[in-house]
Image (spheres, rainbow, N blue to C red):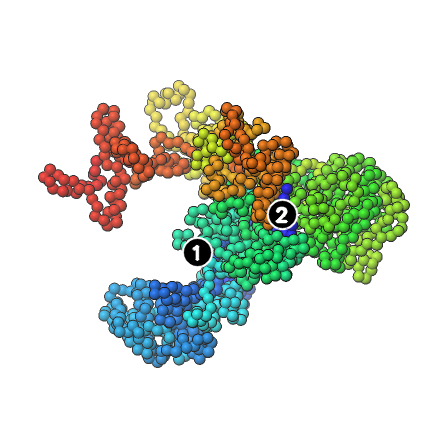
């Protein structure tokens, strides 16, 4: 059963596209842009010039594929080649050469990188967009001041502020503030131009006269009264240089500026006098440039300051495009904000920019305009993986440029391009970024959902972002512009909450880096969902009235007449349907992928939904996966887009299928491939356009010929190109023959032909069709060739073929495909809905097919088979059919119109393949009529070439989190598969559906206290049936090293060791060997110095017959608690050994062990609604409570975990799952289902429970008095529990927090050197310490002596331990000393300059200080 929005047929975009498109953009244009910025590189005399030609760059194929790179611990990369020209203008010589710039890591098809054998993900960073931002500051006296930050993509920030005295200043880092008028004049603006451009010129009515200001500035240099302290702090002025300020100059204007006298002047540097107004100006631009440099360099001698220095300072800071870059986006934002029309190619600051920023600040001071909201998504952009790699590549190029310039400076007579260019700068920069950047993360490969979520993550942290320690609540909160762009639910718990987010399902990132989300246009209350949706960024949606996606529209697509909820900017109100501009495409639009996998999400509290989203990513792949009974319908898309399942690239015939590989025989296309659908179009017309036509004029044409069905879509201008072909032979059975002569119903609006040869591969001279596989549906057009061309003219061939076909041929109808079809998801897909058939009934399962037959008898016989595989005859018949046949395929179709011309001409018996009633049969001859000639036919003269395509299956491959990745084939030899069909499942998928857990029968009830604090009670069946058994693969590495006495060696000659039978001749465990704790995995010996043995020892060796050992055993052994099977051995080359070393055997070995982990007490389990817990006990199945029909439960949960957590969705899920268990049905329930009315979820659950009760006759399944509850029986006593219990079937996950990896024992282990406390953690073999809470517990019991003992000799008193041991042995009195922690406390207090000490009173009554370190 499925709950859908019928009006929503929008195409969900590819989930990994944000990564792939970004890196593709980098390769296509970003890399060329970065190299072009450094062109050309010249020396100081301009005689030598090195020029790159980036548009001609080439990439060499990677030496290793992705799998080999992981196994061999290498980087998946390619070499970057580029042509370089070196010109010597003095000698007039020119050299041109291809050079290697470096190794460029490549992104895999799944959207990640492989660096040194480890899959890594570059996560998307969310930063401030370049542009100008206006803000306000509220002071203690309730007065508001304003400032503007001008943020560049690359370069220094500039702040323009308006203080409480109504003065405007410009601030830069590490320089004093300077008057804004001087900066504007330095940029070339004169005073009249400035005043004319302002809305409020009276703001500058008290301008200071320039003459006195300049005189004082040149005499003793002026200083800002308010910034004198900043100056001294910024420049670390010498103590002997002090500034004396006169209090009487507080309100002094610029005309009263005085020189500040100096108390001492041991240096030539002088300081400013005082001026407190920014309203000072100069006569000319030269004076302004002089004043600009003088004010920004207060320690510079006034005699050395010139206007050229000011000009170069401005150029260096803001005018040099190599240093300061607003980027085209920053220029666009400035133009939009300030209403400018500056060319987008000008990416540096102009005088016009600063003038209009000043005007806007003055307007704000007069109450005109409003400040910016920095948390609005229009002010934040996404730096995707490609852009981050591009920036790092630019850093490497900058380093390379410096090296090249240094080499060009050297006057060398013979310069070669190879000597100038080195690969180290670019390789080093990329290695730094991929290896150590916080945005390059170790990929989460626990399961496909974790991987796909990691690639769609948004982080506000990292270089250029915020700091998690200083980030406030505003930046972490949810903003109204997040709707449809950033998920409000999925974010980590803890200090990263709100700083790390996820993209929503439908969102995409535009070329400027802003997140866009789709909306349908609403015209007079009618939703225009037959047209493609419009994508809006946060800036574009500001002035529009937007309705949510969970408003129900009727069959005519009209919204309800009542007032509807809408959003405009940050306001949520209600209005009528006529005023609504746009509506969301889906209720799922506002949530992320992981959150959308939670059924009945709307009934869960947001905090628990957050936990449920995060814990699904922690689910361990199980050995026997099971699809959920209650899902949301997005499971198949997650599995498909993650790239973990294997799908057919082309249609074809399966000739070989095993656990290692699948081979498909596919036709070689003689025509171009069908173009893929572009993302963001939902209309059926668009589907047809992808094949090559405009569907506005297209119409479905049908024709019936005896034994054949075909449908053709006509188009005004179309070129059909096919990616697959098929044939339909004449049919032998009489009933089927009669059926196929019937007229077919008209197709739906998606121009699709859904009837095809499902169960056989037949005579090649038959019907041809072209198909385009898309992520949403299949576009197929069947073309009937012209019989006049000799089509089906050889009777003998047909009869020969008929004898080889199976007698009974079964047909099926094809459902629209999401990405591929699985048995559970064939009937429908939640990602889209196909337009309903105009004739078929509402509840008919056939409403998703494009073709149907009228005859009821035939409809019963030809029941839909919801799969796409072709169950053919044997491979021998396949090859016999092909042998000697003239197989022809479509090659070319001229641009024109497909028309049908029915004729009354009776066809010969041979042409109709011997079918009956040929006299009554009319033949539809399809011809291609171009604009010039209506008789030009298709050319079918090319022979079909068949080519085998082999798909390699992964077998027990290790992930980053040590879970197993493996494929299970789902197709068999002899089946026909279409493009996009599922070939092999992953370890976490079943039939192409994401399957992370198991459907368990559970009850919410207390059971002997084992439910305390969310603990979980499970049945022994889950252990014995391996329901939650998972495979984990550990990698062990050994590398030989050089020691003081020689080189280590990997060998099987291990001294004093007997268990060597499982090792090969190298001393490495053989693949397939079962190993347990202590067994040798890789034998390794290290040389040791010769011992000087005594005569007796030598005699003993001779008597025993044993040689004196010259090596010691340093072999790698199986760790404690580990047992498993060796599955793979990889022998590598050591990288740390010099080449001059000569040794035998391998130098570096990686060994992989697979181990099975059953479920244990202490393992963590969780549902999809944030209901998590630890297994407290495993009961025998006979002791578990059981249902009235005798079925024992699998799990018992605590009922108190539901009300306070407010995640009621788990109750809906378990009750609907119970109904599905007894009905044998699976449900796809999309969240936010109250679009269909109030209490829709409850109505659905109760109706299904009631249906299950009626069908099975089990009255306890639905009791109207207590719906959802039933009587349970105690498995130990057989008695009924006193109260009815909620029982259901829920989908439970086993999380990666396994007790086997956490629990450990310790007797005497390592201690901290300073505090002498036990270390913490399993990896350090740590233990538990007596903490604060344990001390409170002992205090509460009054156990004074126990407490004293624990805090002294049993804790960290090293000498005291030895004394206690000695006292016990000699039966002496135990003396308790001073703990080490007390001494540490005293030392810490003393280090804080606190005089803390230990004092004692001696015999004479005097107080003396005792040395802390000498305390007993």
Q: Is residue 825 left or right of residue 1013?
A: right
Pick the front one: 1212 or 138: 1212
Residue pointed to by mark 1: 474
Q: Position of residue 509 (x, y in %)?
A: 55, 56
SS class of the residue under badge 2? Answer: loop
Q: CA distance from mark 2 to mark 1?
A: 36 Å
Pick the front one: 761 or 1025: 1025
Q: Residue furthest left?
A: 1404
Q: Is residue 454 visible?
A: yes
Q: Quarter-wise, where is residue 155 in the image? A: bottom left
Circle 2/circle 1 CB separation < 8 Å: no
Q: Image point 43% across, 56% down: which residue?
A: 474
Q: Position of residue 1258 (x, y in %)?
A: 61, 31
Q: Image point 46% across, 24% down: which residue?
A: 1058
Pick the front one: 1405 or 532: 532
The quarter of the image holding the N terminus is top right
Q: Is residue 1314 left or right of residue 49?
A: left
Q: Image point 46% across, 78% down: which residue?
A: 196
Specify which label sits upstream in the sequence, 2 or 1: 2
SS class of the residue under badge 1? Answer: helix
Q: Position of residue 396 (x, y in %)?
A: 48, 56
The quarter of the image holding the C terminus is top left
Q: Is residue 532 visible?
A: no
Q: Position of residue 170 (x, y in %)?
A: 40, 69
Q: Image point 61% across, 48% down: which residue?
A: 1236
**Does residue 82 sit above or below 819 in this rendering?**
below
Residue pointed to by mark 2: 4
């Amino acid at each position: 059963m499925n709950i859908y929005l019928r009006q929503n047929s929008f195409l969900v975009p590819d989930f990994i596209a944000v990564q792939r498109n970004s890196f593709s953009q980098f390769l296509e244009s970003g890399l060329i842009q970065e190299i072009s910025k450094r062109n050309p590189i010249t020396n100081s005399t301009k005689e030598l010039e090195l020029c790159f030609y980036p548009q001609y760059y080439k990439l060499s194929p990677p030496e290793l594929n992705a799998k080999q790179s992981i196994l061999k611990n290498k980087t998946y990369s390619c070499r970057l080649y580029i042509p370089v020209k070196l010109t010597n203008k003095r000698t007039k010589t020119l050299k041109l050469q291809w050079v290697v710039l470096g190794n460029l890591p490549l992104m895999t098809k799944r959207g990640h990188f492989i660096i040194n054998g480890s899959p890594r993900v570059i996560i998307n960073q969310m930063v401030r967009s370049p542009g100008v931002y206006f803000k306000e500051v509220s002071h203690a006296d309730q007065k508001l001041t304003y400032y503007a930050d001008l943020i560049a993509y690359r370069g220094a920030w500039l702040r323009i502020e308006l203080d409480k005295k109504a003065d405007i200043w410009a601030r830069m880092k590490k320089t004093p503030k300077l008057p804004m008028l001087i900066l504007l004049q330095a940029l070339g603006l004169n005073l009249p131009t400035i005043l004319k451009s302002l809305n409020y010129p009276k703001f500058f009515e008290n301008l200071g006269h320039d003459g006195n200001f300049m005189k004082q500035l040149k005499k003793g240099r002026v200083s800002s009264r308010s910034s004198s302290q900043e100056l001294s702090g910024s420049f670390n002025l010498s103590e002997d240089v002090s500034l004396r300020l006169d209090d009487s100059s507080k309100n002094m204007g610029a005309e009263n500026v005085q020189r500040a006298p100096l108390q001492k002047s041991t240096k030539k540097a002088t300081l400013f006098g005082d001026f407190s107004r920014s309203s000072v100006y100069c006569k000319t631009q030269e004076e302004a440039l002089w004043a600009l440099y003088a004010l920004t360099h207060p320690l510079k001698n006034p005699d050395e300051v010139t206007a050229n220095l000011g000009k170069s300072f401005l150029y260096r800071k803001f005018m040099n495009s190599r240093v300061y870059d607003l980027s085209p986006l920053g220029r666009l934002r400035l133009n939009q904000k300030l209403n400018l029309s500056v060319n987008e190619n000008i990416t540096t600051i102009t005088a016009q920019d600063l003038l209009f920023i000043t005007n806007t600040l003055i307007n704000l001071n007069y109450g005109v305009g409003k400040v910016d909201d920095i948390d609005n998504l229009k002010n934040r952009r996404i730096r995707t993986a490609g852009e981050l790699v591009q920036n790092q590549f630019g850093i490497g190029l900058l380093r390379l440029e410096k090296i090249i310039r240094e080499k060009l400076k050297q006057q060398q007579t013979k310069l070669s391009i190879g000597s100038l260019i080195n690969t180290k700068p670019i390789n080093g920069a990329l290695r730094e970024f991929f290896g150590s950047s916080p945005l390059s993360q170790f990929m989460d490969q626990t399961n496909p959902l974790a991987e796909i979520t990691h690639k769609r993550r948004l982080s506000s942290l990292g270089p250029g972002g915020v700091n998690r320690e200083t980030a406030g609540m505003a930046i972490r909160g949810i903003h109204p512009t997040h709707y449809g762009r950033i998920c409000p639910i999925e974010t980590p718990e803890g200090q990263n909450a709100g700083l790390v987010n996820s993209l929503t399902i439908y969102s995409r990132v535009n070329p400027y880096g802003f997140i866009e989300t789709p909306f349908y246009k609403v015209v007079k209350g009618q939703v225009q969902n037959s047209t493609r949706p419009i994508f809006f960024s946060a800036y574009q949606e500001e002035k529009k009235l937007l309705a949510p996606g969970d408003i129900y529209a009727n069959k005519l697509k009209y919204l309800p007449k009542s007032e509807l909820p809408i959003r405009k900017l940050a306001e949520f109100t209600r209005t009528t349907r006529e005023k609504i501009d746009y509506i969301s495409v889906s209720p799922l639009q506002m949530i992320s992928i992981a959150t959308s996998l939670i059924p009945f999400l709307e009934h869960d509290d947001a905090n628990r939904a957050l936990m449920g989203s995060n814990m699904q990513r922690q689910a361990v792949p199980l050995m026997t996966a099971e699809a959920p009974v209650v899902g949301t319908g997005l499971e198949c898309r997650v599995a498909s887009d993650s790239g973990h399942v294997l799908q057919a690239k082309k249609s074809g015939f399966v000739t070989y299928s095993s656990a290692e590989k699948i081979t498909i025989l596919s036709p070689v296309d003689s025509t171009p491939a069908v173009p893929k659908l572009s993302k963001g179009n939902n209309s059926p017309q668009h589907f047809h356009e992808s094949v090559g036509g405009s569907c506005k004029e297209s119409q479905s044409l049908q024709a019936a010929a005896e034994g054949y069905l075909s449908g053709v879509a006509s188009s005004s201008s179309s070129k059909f190109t096919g990616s697959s072909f098929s044939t339909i032979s004449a049919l032998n059975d009489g009933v089927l023959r009669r059926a196929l002569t019937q007229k077919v119903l008209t197709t739906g609006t998606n121009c699709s032909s859904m009837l095809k040869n499902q169960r056989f591969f037949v005579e090649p001279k038959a019907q041809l069709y072209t198909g385009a596989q898309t992520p949403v549906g299949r576009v197929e057009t069947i073309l009937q060739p012209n019989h006049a061309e000799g089509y089906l003219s050889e009777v003998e061939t047909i009869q020969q073929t008929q004898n080889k076909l199976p007698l009974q041929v079964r047909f099926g109808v094809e459902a629209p495909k999401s990405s591929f079809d699985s048995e559970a998801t064939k009937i429908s897909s939640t990602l889209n809905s196909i337009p309903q058939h105009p004739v078929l009934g509402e509840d008919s399962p056939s409403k998703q097919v494009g073709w149907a037959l009228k005859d009821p008898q035939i409809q019963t016989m030809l029941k839909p088979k919801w799969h796409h595989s072709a169950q053919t005859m044997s491979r021998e018949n396949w090859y016999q059919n092909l042998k000697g046949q003239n197989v022809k395929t479509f090659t070319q179709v001229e641009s024109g119109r497909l028309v049908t011309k029915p004729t009354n001409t009776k066809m010969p018996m041979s042409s109709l393949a011997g079918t009956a009633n040929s006299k009554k049969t009319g033949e539809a001859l399809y011809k291609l009529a171009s604009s010039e000639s209506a008789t030009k036919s298709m050319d079918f003269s090319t022979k079909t070439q068949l080519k085998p395509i082999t798909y390699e299956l992964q077998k027990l491959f290790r992930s980053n989190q040590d879970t197993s990745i493996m494929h299970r084939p789902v197709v068999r030899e002899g089946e026909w598969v279409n493009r996009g069909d599922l070939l092999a499942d992953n370890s976490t998928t079943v039939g192409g559906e994401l399957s992370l857990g198991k459907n368990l029968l559970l009850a919410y009830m207390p059971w002997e206290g084992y439910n305390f604090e969310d603990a979980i009670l499970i049945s022994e069946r889950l252990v014995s049936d391996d329901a939650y058994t998972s495979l984990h693969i550990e990698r062990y590495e050994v590398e030989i090293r050089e020691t003081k006495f020689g080189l280590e060696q990997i060998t099987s000659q291990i001294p004093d060791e007997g268990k060597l039978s499982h090792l090969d001749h190298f001393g490495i465990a053989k693949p397939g060997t079962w190993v347990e704790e202590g067994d040798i995995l890789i034998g390794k010996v290290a040389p040791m110095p010769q011992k000087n043995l005594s005569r007796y020892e030598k005699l003993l060796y001779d008597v025993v017959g044993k040689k004196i050992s010259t090596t010691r055993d340093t072999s790698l052994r199986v760790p404690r608690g580990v047992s498993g099977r060796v599955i793979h051995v990889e022998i590598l080359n050591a990288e740390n050994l010099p080449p001059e070393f000569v040794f035998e055997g391998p130098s570096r070995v990686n060994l992989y062990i697979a181990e099975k982990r059953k479920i244990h007490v202490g393992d963590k389990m969780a549902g999809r609604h944030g209901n998590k817990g630890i297994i407290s006990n495993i009961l025998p199945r006979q002791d578990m409570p059981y249902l009235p029909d005798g079925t024992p439960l699998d799990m018992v949960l605590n009922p108190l975990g539901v009300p306070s957590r407010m995640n009621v969705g788990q109750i809906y899920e378990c009750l609907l799952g119970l109904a599905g268990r007894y009905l044998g049905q699976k449900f796809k329930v999309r969240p936010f289902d109250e679009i269909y009315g109030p209490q829709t979820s409850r109505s659905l659950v109760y109706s299904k429970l009631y249906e299950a009760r009626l069908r099975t006759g089990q009255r306890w399944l639905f009791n109207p008095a207590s719906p959802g509850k039933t009587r349970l029986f105690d498995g130990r006593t057989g008695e009924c529990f006193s109260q009815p219990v909620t029982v259901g079937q829920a989908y439970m996950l086993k999380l990666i927090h396994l007790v086997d990896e956490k629990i450990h024992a310790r007797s005497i282990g390592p201690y901290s050197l300073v505090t002498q406390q036990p270390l913490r953690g399993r990896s350090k073999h740590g233990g538990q310490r007596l903490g604060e809470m344990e001390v409170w517990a002992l205090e509460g019991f009054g156990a004074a002596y126990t407490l004293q003992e624990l805090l002294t000799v049993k804790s960290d008193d090293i000498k005291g331990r030895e004394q206690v041991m000695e006292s016990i042995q000699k039966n002496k009195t135990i003396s308790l000393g001073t703990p080490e922690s007390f001494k540490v406390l005293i030392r810490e207090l003393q280090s804080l300059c606190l005089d803390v000490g230990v004092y004692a009173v001696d015999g004479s009554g005097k107080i003396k200080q005792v040395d802390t370190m000498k305390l007993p």
